[in-house]
């Protein structure tokens, strides 16, 4: 048992390390792509602020990982170990191939698959029907409202292809209505449902926030020279990159915190789910180290292949992504920081028109988003059955 506990903690730390390795792109891709900082300066800054993030925010996400996905009685040390191994392998492989993925979703899928193999589908914590009904109402209201607003504006301006505007308006309306319902307290969404919902919401929030901020800056500085804008936003982008790194560390570093704490509770070392300070420090340090070493293939994909970034656009992407991460972290939702910054980069790219974004690269990234949870869950399920047949 002690060997399994030690192995589980080691793999949790390793998971945060490869998380930082892949998600280094989230923290530094934009600031390096615009050449405001060198790659070394970028990773040093990101590593430092990734370490600070978990110490600023609460540990709500750690509790979601450790208590909000699988019934705690079935989250044994063996279940956690197998889930961690699969998650680490998927994140490392994706980093090697240069594919930006969600490490958080890899972990969720790994834990789900191994837990289901151990205890059946009943181990999954499902939302109350009342929460699902409220969510559906929020989606319906947002879709109708957004479609009417954006479709109506497009029709007023005489735009063609109105159906596309109505569809985009509906999607934007849903993106806004769900967080609004959460903020005002009528949608107590949590656990697995929140994770699944924010697969769509977080990149759209990042896209909307960055697009609106980008359009505002374009309007304010429309008479300014390029050199003037560069001088201003080169300085501002350092702060926006630091802000994003804090949000990244506060959200993603808590994955390992939740797993390690769950292991300690399952082993009887802790009597209640309270994240110890040493767990916070070691989790933040491991993700900071991964960020420092960097996943340069992912950095290239995020920083140059989606769209060509200017300094003000890098500022908008980092600020938009940081706002999204701060919001979801405050409500304890483990989201993909990759989703948030990818959406933000798409948003600022779209300010220059549809063709400014390489949508083929976007489709490749989105495909990786969609398959991560079911893929890791399937592998973890099979791996746990094999492991259980030999060791349990």
Image (cartoon, grey):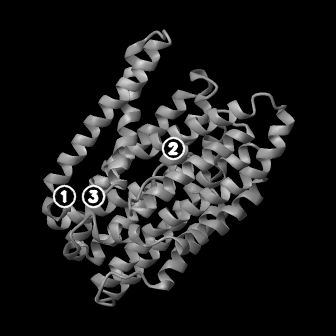
Residue 282, image x and y in percent? 53, 78
Q: Which residue is mark 1?
A: 126
Which one is in front, 19 or 352? 352
Q: Secondary structure at mark 2?
A: helix
Tell me which numbered mark, 2 or 3, is placed earlier along the sequence.
3
Tell me which numbered mark, 3 or 1, is placed earlier along the sequence.
1
- Left or right of 188 in this view: 225: right
Q: Could you tell me how far apart the alpha carbons at marks 2 and 3 are, in whole angstroms?
A: 22 Å
Q: Which disc, if any, is residue 143? A: none
Residue 235 seen anywhere in this rendered image of the structure: yes
Residue 77, image x and y in percent? 30, 77
Which one is in front, 164 or 264? 164
Count how many numbered circles sit on residues in the image: 3
Q: Which residue is mark 3?
A: 188
Which one is in front, 70 or 250? 250
Q: Secondary structure at mark 3?
A: loop
Residue 38, image x and y in percent? 79, 53
Which image quadrant: the C terminus? bottom left
Label 3 neighbourhood size at 10 Å, few (<14), some (14-19), many (20+)? some
Q: Residue at x 50, y 47 (%)?
A: 340
Query: Does residue 251 lie above or below 151 as drawn?
Result: below
Residue 266, image x and y in percent? 28, 82
Q: Which residue is mark 2?
A: 206
Mark 2 against mark 3, which lies toward the viewer?
A: 3
Which one is in front, 135 or 356? 135
């Amino acid at each position: 048992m002690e060997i399994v506990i030690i192995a589980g903690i080691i793999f949790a730390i390793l998971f945060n390390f490869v998380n930082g390795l892949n998600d280094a792109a989230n923290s530094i891709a934009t600031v390096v792509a615009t050449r405001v900082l060198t790659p070394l300066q970028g990773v040093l800054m990101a590593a430092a602020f990734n370490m600070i993030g978990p110490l600023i925010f609460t540990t709500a996400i750690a509790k979601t990982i450790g208590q909000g996905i699988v019934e705690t009685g079935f989250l044994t040390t063996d279940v956690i170990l197998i889930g961690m191994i699969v998650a680490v392998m998927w994140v490392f492989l994706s980093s090697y191939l240069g594919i930006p993925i969600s490490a958080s979703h890899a972990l969720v899928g790994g834990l789900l698959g191994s837990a289901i193999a151990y205890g059946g589908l009943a181990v999954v914590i499902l939302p109350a029907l009342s929460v699902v009904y409220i969510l559906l109402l929020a989606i319906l209201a947002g879709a109708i409202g957004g479609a009417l607003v954006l479709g109506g504006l497009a029709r007023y301006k005489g735009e063609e292809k109105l159906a596309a505007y109505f569809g985009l308006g509906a999607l934007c309306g849903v993106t806004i209505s769900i967080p609004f319902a959460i903020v005002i307290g009528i949608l107590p969404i949590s656990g697995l449902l929140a994770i699944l919902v924010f697969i769509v919401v977080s990149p759209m929030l990042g896209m909307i926030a960055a697009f609106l901020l980008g359009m505002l800056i374009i309007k304010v500085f429309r008479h300014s020279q390029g050199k003037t804008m560069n001088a201003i936003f080169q300085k501002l982008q350092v702060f926006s990159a630091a802000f994003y790194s804090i949000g990244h560390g506060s959200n993603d570093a808590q994955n390992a915190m939740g797993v390690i704490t769950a292991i300690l509770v399952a082993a009887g070392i802790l009597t209640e789910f309270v994240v110890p300070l040493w767990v916070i420090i070691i989790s933040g340090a491991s993700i900071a180290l991964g960020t420092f070493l960097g996943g340069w293939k992912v950095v290239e994909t995020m920083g140059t292949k989606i769209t060509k970034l200017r300094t003000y656009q890098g500022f908008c992407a980092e600020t938009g992504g940081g706002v999204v991460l701060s919001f979801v972290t405050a409500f304890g939702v483990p989201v993909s920081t990759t989703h948030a910054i990818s959406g933000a980069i798409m948003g600022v790219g779209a300010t220059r028109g549809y063709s400014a974004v390489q949508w083929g690269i976007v489709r490749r990234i989105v495909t990786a988003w969609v398959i991560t949870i079911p893929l890791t869950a399937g592998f973890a399920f099979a791996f746990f059955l094999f492991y259980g047949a030999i060791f349990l």
